[in-house]
Amino acid sequence: MSETKSAPRYHPETRLVHSGTLRSQFAETSEALFLTQGYVYDTAEQCEARFKGDDPGFIYSRYSNPTVAMFEQRMAALEGAETARALATGMAAVTTAMLAPLKAGDHVVAAKALFGSCRYVVEDLLPRYGIESTLVDGLDLDQWRKAMRPNTKTCFIESPTNPTLDVLDIGGIAEIAHQAGARLIVDNVFATPIWQSPLELGADVVVYSATKHIDGQGRTLGGVILSSNAFVQDHLQTFIRQTGPSISPFNAWILLKGLETLSVRVRQQTESAAAIAEVLASHPKVSRLIYPGRPDHPQAALVKKQMRAGSTLIGFDVKGGKAAAFRCLNALKLARISNNLGDAKSLVTHPATTTHQRLAPEVRAGLGIGEGFIRYSAGLEHKDDLIEDLVAALEKV
């Protein structure tokens, strides 16, 4: 239902407004919201053909719905993917993309630097079903090569990583995965489809938490898997149909409308994030700044090679550890404490006590997540106001 049709290669901004639109007989301007569980058929013969796959159309909204299909088609057009499947949350997308193709006896290699829930899936969930996993330093291609086994089927990374904004070599890791007969799944949330295209770099599957930039206004949850038609038909379609990690048509409609402004929002947020990073780089209360758009980023050359711009997010260490970081967070007036990101409102997170708190202290330290580390997601407020707010808060440290 959601395969992209051949069309001119319009710019992303145009695809974000027009791709995938299905109009009803009323010829509405805005995309229609189809709040229905099921569908009716003209005849019993048509119903039989629909279930056999001989007649195109919708059957049940657990796995196919016109509004959801519009969102999927628009995402696929934006990403340059053959097809997409939308799910209830970002973690539903990650878990489905990883688990659906695998079976007991398979092996997964993933980067150590992952969002806490993603790491849980790799480290704890998959092994319960007889699927082995190995974590590696995602920046070290030699570790990827050494971790590959004859039964390695999937590699999984985030780039930039959550929350330390390391940038991994997608093309290099994809080549290693493919040489071993494995697929590469990339979580592209921190880059967004505006600034990075993993499929063009060699990845096989891209996943998003649409809850973040795609909604971008704190309203709803959603996830997306983008890939080839073969991956969906061979692995995802039956899994999604039978297990039901479905997205609500209403949520899909909100995300569909969010896509119309995605480029405008991400560009503004990135501009603000870069300006904030410039101030933090020389601030006396900040011991470390990480921003992918700067020449002092540890992987600056790779950023320039595989990303079109930086990020809407900044990572920095406040001198004085947890107590100092908490004083800074509590003193902010505009940026609000939250574990979300990519919102119109600027949001700040203390990963060591929230998104990555389940990791042991030594594991967090090895990932660069210190007690004074703060993740800052730039919103749509004026950048000068955000800078003033953050500088004033650092004075409280």
Image: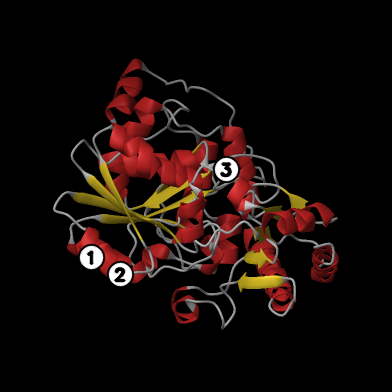
Tell me, for residue 145, which label it has, or none: 1
What's the residue type where badge 3 is placed? Arg
> Who is closer to the viewer here, 361 or 359?
361
Q: CA distance from mark 1 to mark 3?
A: 49 Å
Are the residues flagged by discs 1 and 3 in contact, CB closer than 8 Å? no
Q: Give the quarter of the figure containing the N terminus.
A: top left
Q: Residue at x 44, y 77 (%)?
A: 302
* Residue position for label 2: 141
Which quadrant of the structure image shows residue 27? top right
What's the residue type where badge 1 is placed? Arg
Tell me, for residue 205, which label it has, or none: none
Q: CA distance from mark 1 to mark 2?
A: 6 Å
Q: Residue at x 36, y 43 (%)?
A: 123
Tell me, for residue 23, which label it has, or none: 3
Q: Residue at x 40, y 59 (%)?
A: 6
Which type of secondary structure does the marked residue at label 3 adopt?
Answer: loop
Are the residues flagged by discs 1 and 2 in contact, CB closer than 8 Å? yes
Specify whether 76 is left or right of 175. Answer: right
Instruction: Tell which circle, 1 or 3, labels the residue nearer the N-terminal end.
Output: 3
> Who is closer to the viewer here, 104 or 53?
104
What's the residue type where badge 2 is placed? Leu
Which quadrant of the structure image shows residue 239? top left
Specify whether 119 is left or right of 55. Answer: right
Expressed as whole percent of the image width and height from the top left, the position of residue 233 reads 28, 41
Look at the image and tell me whether residue 113 can be seen.
yes
Expressed as whole percent of the image width and height from the top left, the position of residue 271 reads 69, 72
